């Protein structure tokens, strides 16, 4: 499985300094996530079978929940998102708070821009 995040809670050990397999097994069984690394290669994550199954179960539940979730609209046009990025956080929060009542609705871009203009001119 490709790495999808960097977990700072992993114990990182250079392969040249790796302990015995027996020690790695005991540490993994104690729920310690160990990443063995070697220059120029991907790290190898050592976890217990139970921890791996828990991760796979969580990933499957997350995927199922994501697929089952209703659309999170309204969808914001890219240029509006750029304008929001340049605005003060309080302005963006006020704008988004006004949109919360319309979750899942399809609001035309022109109306979204009009709401943005009203928020920024208030």
Image (cartoon, helix red, strand yellow):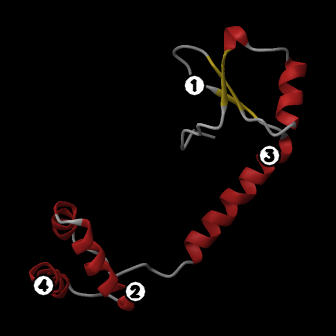
Mark 4 or 1: in front is: 4
Name the one closer to the observer, 55 or 93.
Answer: 93
Q: Are marks 1 and 3 in contact (CB under 8 Å)?
A: no
Secondary element type, mark 3 = helix
- First in residue order: circle 1 vs circle 3: 1
Secondary element type, mark 1 = loop
In the figure, residue 34 lies in which quadrant? Answer: top right
How many angstroms separate mark 3 from mark 4 (CA)? 52 Å
Q: Are marks 4 and 2 in contact (CB under 8 Å)?
A: no
- First in residue order: circle 4 vs circle 2: 2
- First in residue order: circle 4 vs circle 1: 1
Can you identify the residue that label 2 sits on?
103
Q: Residue at x 56, y 72 (%)?
A: 67
Q: Position of residue 112 (x, y in %)?
A: 20, 83
Can you identify the residue that label 3 sits on?
51
Mark identifier at residue 50: none
Name the one closer to the observer, 47 or 84.
Answer: 84
Mark identifier at residue 42: 1
Can you identify the residue that label 4 sits on?
122
């Amino acid at each position: 499985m490709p790495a999808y995040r960097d977990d700072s809670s992993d114990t990182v050990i250079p392969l040249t300094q790796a302990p015995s397999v027996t020690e790695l097994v005991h540490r993994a069984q104690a729920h310690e996530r160990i990443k063995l690394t070697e220059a120029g290669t991907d790290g190898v994550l050592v976890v217990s079978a139970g921890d791996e199954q828990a991760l796979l179960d969580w990933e499957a539940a997350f995927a199922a929940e994501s697929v089952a979730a209703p659309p999170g609209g309204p969808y914001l046009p890219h240029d509006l998102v750029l304008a929001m990025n340049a605005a003060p956080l309080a302005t963006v929060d006020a704008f988004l708070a006004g949109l919360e009542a319309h979750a899942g609705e399809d609001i035309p871009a022109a109306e979204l821009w009009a709401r943005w203009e009203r928020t920024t001119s208030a």
